[in-house]
Amino acid sequence: MTEKHERRTFLSKLLGGALAVGVVGVIGAVMAYLFPPERRVFNPARRRMRVARADEIPLGKGKQVLFDGEPVWVLHLKGGWSAFSAICTHQGCIVHWDEKRLILSCPCHAGLFDTNGNVLSGLPRRPLKRFRVSVVRDEIFIGPGEG
Ligand code: FES
């Protein structure tokens, strides 16, 4: 085989490979156009989020989690589980769970909320937004707010 023939063979293989890659790319683009990926429609009403195993939050304790970008307090109380938005209804500061006094307190203007999310004192006029809580096989889940 001559050097010229080897070069021609190499170039034709290179060209063939480039053509094959191009054809596959075009076919992929056409298929993606004809059969677009499934559109996922966000349905917040069906959504829930795992918070923890039940034994990870002892009685009287709380755990703050982010649900759809919103800080939420999940509380383990004598009557069961409750979850409230951690966003104060006065001006939006983040409330803290005070496990000694069993209240949610706002550091900004001394707003206080009871374990039902109702205002105890301070400047807030509306209760905290409540979230659904469910326990499935010792796992705690929260769902979208109720108000
Ligand atoms: S922001 Fe909470 S009391 Fe004002």
Image (cartoon, rainbow, N blue to C red):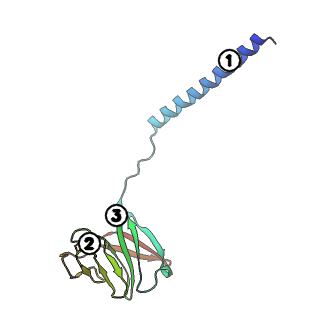
Q: Which residue is mark 2?
A: 88
Give me the C-alpha separation between circle 1 and circle 3.
60 Å
Q: Nearer the viewer, mark 3 or mark 2?
A: 2
- Disc 3 to disc 2: CB gap under 8 Å: no
Q: Quadrant of the C terminus?
A: bottom left
Judge from the rendering whether residue 35 lies leftward or rightward of residue 145; answer left or right: right
Label placed on residue 20: none
Give coordinates of residue 96: x percent, y percent. 34, 77
| Beta carbon at label 2 within 8 Å of ligand 1 | yes
Name the residue: 18% across, 77% down: 123
Secondary structure under the numbered disc 2 in the rendered image: loop
Decide which of 82, 124 is in the foreground and name it: 124
Q: Of marks 3 and 2, which one's residue comes earlier in the chain?
A: 3
Name the residue: 52% across, 29% down: 26
Judge from the rendering whether residue 30 lies leftward or rightward of residue 82; answer left or right: right
Q: Dot 3, crowdedness within 10 Å: few (<14), some or many (≥20)?
A: few
Q: Dot 1, crowdedness within 10 Å: few (<14), some or many (≥20)?
A: few
Name the residue: 27% across, 72% down: 129
- Disc 2 to disc 1: CB gap under 8 Å: no
Q: Which residue is mark 3?
A: 45
**Which amino acid type is marked by label 1?**
Leu
Q: Nearer the viewer, mark 2 or mark 1?
A: 2
Name the residue: 61% across, 26% down: 20
Give me the C-alpha separation between circle 2 and circle 1.
70 Å
Label placed on residue 11: 1
Decide which of 50, 119 is in the foreground and name it: 119
Secondary structure under the numbered disc 1 in the rendered image: helix
**Which amino acid type is marked by label 3?**
Ala
Judge from the rendering whether residue 1 lies leftward or rightward of residue 135; answer left or right: right
Secondary structure under the numbered disc 3 in the rendered image: helix
**Which amino acid type is marked by label 2?**
Cys
| Beta carbon at label 3 within 8 Å of ligand 1 | no
